[in-house]
Image (spheres, helix red, strand yellow):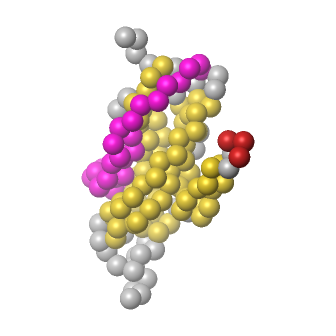
């Protein structure tokens, strides 16, 4: 079996949710880059990672890692899944719902998109100091 040609990713987007609409459009809501929880450790119930990939070819296995930026500590990952890229000229949109992601402490985290175990894009998300709320 031939090895796939890895796609490259346009910038990742993180948002609260999405809605698939008529005609293949995707409505995104609540784009963000900072989370300010009441306390730590914090488990974020749900968010979406949206990626647009192009230039690849073949069957590709992909997954997402969440890491502490400073140390590289892995705090969450998604199960791998495969998709087919029929030609190098199309754009593939991936939307990954992330449920129950733990953030053990304030700081920068990397949301990494991996294809064939190679990181092709990342997004930095900041976990701010606690708000002190109840």
Compared to residue 16, the image places residue 13 above or below, namely above
Residue 8: x and y, percent?
53, 31
Whether residue 26 sits left or right of residue 67 in the image: it is right
Residue 37 sits above or below residue 87 on the image: below
> What's the residue at 33%, 48% (across, down)?
77
Q: Residue at x 43, y 27 (%)?
A: 60
Query: Does the magenta run of residues contain 65?
Result: yes
Quarter occupied by residue 16: bottom right
Q: Does the rendering let one see residue 70? A: no
In the picture as drawn, the residue positioned furthest to the right comes out as 23
**Residue 87's quadrant in the figure?**
top right
Rendered position, 31 above or below 93: below
User: Dividing the image into 4 quarters, which one contains the N terminus?
Assistant: top left
Q: Residue at x 55, y 59 (%)?
A: 17
- How far across and how far down the image is residue 68, in percent? 33, 56
Over which residues does the magenta segment extend? 63-88
Measured from the top left, where is residue 62 in percent x and y?
41, 35
Q: Quadrant of the C terminus?
A: bottom left
Q: Quadrant of residue 42?
A: bottom left
């Amino acid at each position: 079996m031939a090895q796939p040609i890895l796609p490259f990713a346009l910038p990742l987007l993180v948002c609260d949710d999405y809605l698939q609409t008529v005609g293949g459009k995707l409505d995104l809501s609540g784009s963000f880059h900072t989370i300010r929880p009441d306390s730590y450790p914090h488990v974020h119930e749900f968010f979406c990672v949206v990626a647009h990939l192009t230039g690849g070819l073949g069957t590709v296995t992909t997954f997402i890692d969440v890491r502490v930026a400073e140390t590289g500590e892995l705090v969450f990952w998604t199960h791998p899944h495969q998709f087919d890229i029929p030609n190098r000229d199309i754009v593939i949109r991936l939307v990954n719902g992330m449920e129950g992601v733990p953030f053990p402490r304030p700081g920068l985290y990397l949301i990494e998109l991996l294809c064939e175990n190679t990181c092709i894009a990342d997004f930095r998300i900041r976990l701010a100091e606690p708000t002190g709320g109840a």
